[in-house]
Image (spheres, rainbow, N blue to C red):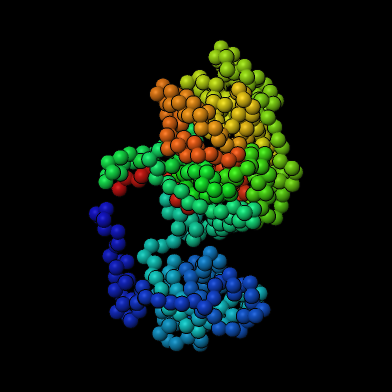
Amino acid sequence: MSEHKLFDAEALQLLDELRNEGYDPYPLKFTPSHQAKEILANFATLENTPVTIAGRVITKRLHGKAGFAHLLAGGTKIQIYFRKDNLDEDTFRLVKKRVNVGDIIGITGEVFKTHTEEITVSVTSCTLLSKSLSPLPEKFHGIENVEVRYRQRYLDLIMNEDVRKTFQMRSSILRSIRETLHHEGYMEVETPTLQDMYGGALAKPFTTHHNALDQDFFLRIAPELYLKRLIIGGLDKVFEIGKAYRNEGISVNHNPEFTLMELYEAYGNYETMMDISEKLIRGMRDSVLETDIIEYRGKTINLSVPFRKMKLAEAFEEFAQVDIVKLQDEKYAKEYLKKEKIHVDKNLSWATIVDEILKKKVEPQLSNPTFLYEYPLPLSPLAKKTSPGSIWVERFQLIMGSLEVGNAFTELNDPVDQQERFLSQNEAKQQGDEEAHSFDRSYIEALKFGLPPTGGLGFGIDRIVMILTGSESIRDVLFFPQLRRREP
């Protein structure tokens, strides 16, 4: 069979038979009066009331003159009851002979409860809305089906209630973030995802080309530099929830396309960002959880206690048994890395070494939400120093369940200092560091007009959703994760 011939003769014959019998397998319009969720929640007021609903048939047990089926309607399962005496002959023949599991139908009927107390709709009319030409999987669970689950997420959603619940929780988490920030006076904005100069993080971008302008563009790695331009413009509290892209590896914690929330507050700092971080996390918890205790990847997370605050240098002493300042010495650093069997692929810069030890030795030991603060300057080219001449900047990362879920700065607003840091990053880029920050002249031009003292915060939405839903992989909280293209 040709790769473009997707329909077998039996499926096409079935459509012809339906049309010859007077049934349109794909009619133009059907208007439900109620949702399944609404019927189940309001039985007391809807009992014996006619309702019209639509959904996909996921079970069917019809024998003789009566039987039951279940519809999946709007993500909610509801039982329907067919009885020959309640239907005209043509409709009953349709239900018995032509409506199968997988088909989408619309029905009208009265709401009642069976003797087992299940809320049910007794069908008085039925319309075929979309004939399924592929059978649903009989069983759709287990690791052996993980590739199919990600490639055909629509089947996963049909067959797996837990998957539907995960994405419903994700929606609630996003709604909670917006509600909290609107309550705190933040304005939601949108900034470009296609940029002529990427920045706002240390990461490798995706590159594309604009034909009309004959110019390379980049998918954004972060919205930071555009959002801070809005602070310069006088919008004192702004946030954005949107996609970011980083041309890096794929793992259970990383997807090249991910959802990022960033916010900026004029006259705030990284301590202000700690406060809003706690409010956001607790708001999400209240929206999707019924407990303060989360079991995640073998760790217990307690959201009822105040978030811990710990200097990064102290965390290195406690969890990695190493002096973070001494890691600037290459000999000392190499000896430590060899002893701890930590491999660093990139150049042995202080920033690279610190980042690798942080991931391997510190983060794995942090379960409850913890603010690690005061980071080395080379790791944070956009953050403000703790004091003039300091090697530390006012930055924190929020670690929860051993995952970094948040990152915040007191934003650097000295344009001369920012230019020097961009130049330093540019040198690193010329020496082969693909993740180094580009020199952004237009951002320096904006800073020259004056960025007020500002706090900025970024949250990795996908990772937070992973923790709050108990999902092991980032792919489980993305509708359509990146996968290698399947050959035809």
Name the quadrant of the N terminus: bottom left
For image coordinates 44% across by 61% down, the residue present is: 136
Q: Residue furthest front?
A: 449
Examine the rendering and report whether any part of residue 82 can be seen: no
Q: Please say if 135 is above or below 149.
A: below
Residue 276 in the image: state x and y as whole percent: 65, 46
Residue 326 in the image: state x and y as whole percent: 62, 16
Q: Quadrant of residue 314?
A: top right
For image coordinates 53% across by 28% down, the residue present is: 417
Front residue (pair 122, 178): 178
Front residue (pair 130, 257): 257
Q: Residue furthest right?
A: 305
Residue 59 in the image: state x and y as whole percent: 50, 68
Q: Residue furthest left?
A: 2
Q: Please say if 318 is above or below 200.
A: above
Front residue (pair 477, 256): 256
For image coordinates 35% across by 46% down, the residue present is: 486
Report the number of numbered marks: 0
Residue 28 in the image: state x and y as whole percent: 37, 75
Left or right of residue 384: residue 108? left
For image coordinates 54% across by 53% down, the residue present is: 188
Q: Please say if 254 is above or below 52.
A: above
Front residue (pair 436, 125): 436
